[in-house]
Amino acid sequence: MESPPPTPSAAWRWIPTLYFSQGVPYVVAMTLSVVMYKNLQVSNTDIALYTSWLYLPWVIKPLWSPLVDRFRTKRLWIIGLQLVIGAALAMVALAVPGPAFFRATLAIFWLLAFSSATHDIAADGFYLLALPPHQQAAFVGVRSTFYRLAMIAGQGGLVYLAGTLQLATGNISWAWSLVFGFLAAFFVLMALYHLIFLPRPLGDHPVKCAARFSAGYLGVFAAFFQKKEIGIILGYLLLYRFAEAQLVKLAVPFLLDGREVGGLSLSTQQVGIIYGTIGVIALTLGGLVGGYAISRLGLKRLLWPMLLTMHVPNAIFIFLALLQPANAYVIGGAVAVEQFGYGFGFTAYLLYMMLVAEGEHKTAHYAICTGFMALGMMLPGMAAGWIQDHVGYSNFFIWVCLATLPSFAVTALLKIDPAFGQKPPPGSQPVTSATGAPRQ
């Protein structure tokens, strides 16, 4: 039985848990695995080399996103993949105490990473199908909030739990085994919860195509790259965060590095409070305010204010690098302003991806957008450390501010329906696609 259009209160039953569940496997593969291997005396060379490859599924997930569109429902994909993720975490728990733990757990993390990336495709597609456009805009901050809470829970709570269990048991392997066992149980519970509370949207069905599969599969990608003004779309997806992709790679090293090399010489605990707590809270608030603002005013009216709010605060890091303040409140306030601006401005990027994805293959096309988003973060970030090593922190942050110019240039070329993302007046027909056509 398919569900009627959801009320905001009904959406609160599943959006927070769905996006918390989306964030946990990512932080497990990208961060928790690193901490565990370091605890278990794996060399830094092996940790960096092999765990870096775990990021690959999120970069290339658009390649199999049409499969999620064409087979079964997004709801079924979500529930099934949460059970698979739970099983993978249980296998990690069993493999950690073994003699060949590194190879065994690494192979399982690969399964986890591919399952998690596929879960992202289904979850994002389900979000687009289950909510009308004005609710998509209103809840985009909520989904980001709970995704970030999952990051905090993984990088903070689970690492703290592992350390506590190590002290209690005196056995590092068993401590991590218990942590992953707990995570496995959590995902089984999440699958059962979503079996009950996920709605059944009218549009959640396989995309039907009379053509043979290979033609239909390639047709999904062809349809994306045949979108009107695809060059501008790709330019925006790749360049909007060109500067931020470099800044985010060096922000924490800058806070930790000694003053003799241009850093702020904060302790790890201070960085955890200032960047990991105050910064995340500000980032979250920025996303919530951004989602609410777009739902009221629409994306087109806020596109430039959000662009400026995201990029102008980058100059705060020039101030920090030149003056090297020692006052933690000054540093914390500066980081909070920059992170709030990032969260507020990034909302426009998320809504634009939803606009681009509108159409018959919205799940697959949104996944393609997120693939370009990942590429736009990965490639500039790879060079950030090399640049900073050669020019120092002050000049690097000046470069970051100059690197915002491409995003201004490509934003000037965008054409967006004024009503997109805005809550429609009572009794009116929502405008939801790039062409102004109603949602199907």
Image (cartoon, rainbow, N blue to C red):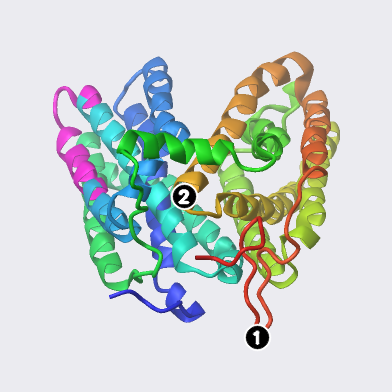
Q: Nearer the viewer, residue 222 or 54?
A: 222
Residue 290: x %, y % from top left: 69, 62
Indicate the quadrant where residue 100 lies. top left
Residue 208: x %, y % from top left: 35, 52
Residue 18 magenta-highlighted: no
Confirm whether residue 358 shows in the render: yes
| Amino acid type, mark 2 | His
Q: Residue at x 85, y 38 (%)?
A: 319
Residue 19: x %, y % from top left: 43, 57
Q: Which residues are magenta?
A: 85-103
Q: Main secondary structure of the magenta part?
A: helix
Q: Which residue is mark 2?
A: 361
Q: Nearer the viewer, residue 1 or 199?
A: 1
Q: Residues within 10 Å of mark 1 (few under 14, many from 20)?
A: few
Confirm whether residue 163 shows in the render: no
Residue 89 magenta-highlighted: yes
- Vertical placement of 225 versus 85: above or below? above
Q: Secondary structure at mark 2?
A: loop
Label annotation for residue 426: 1
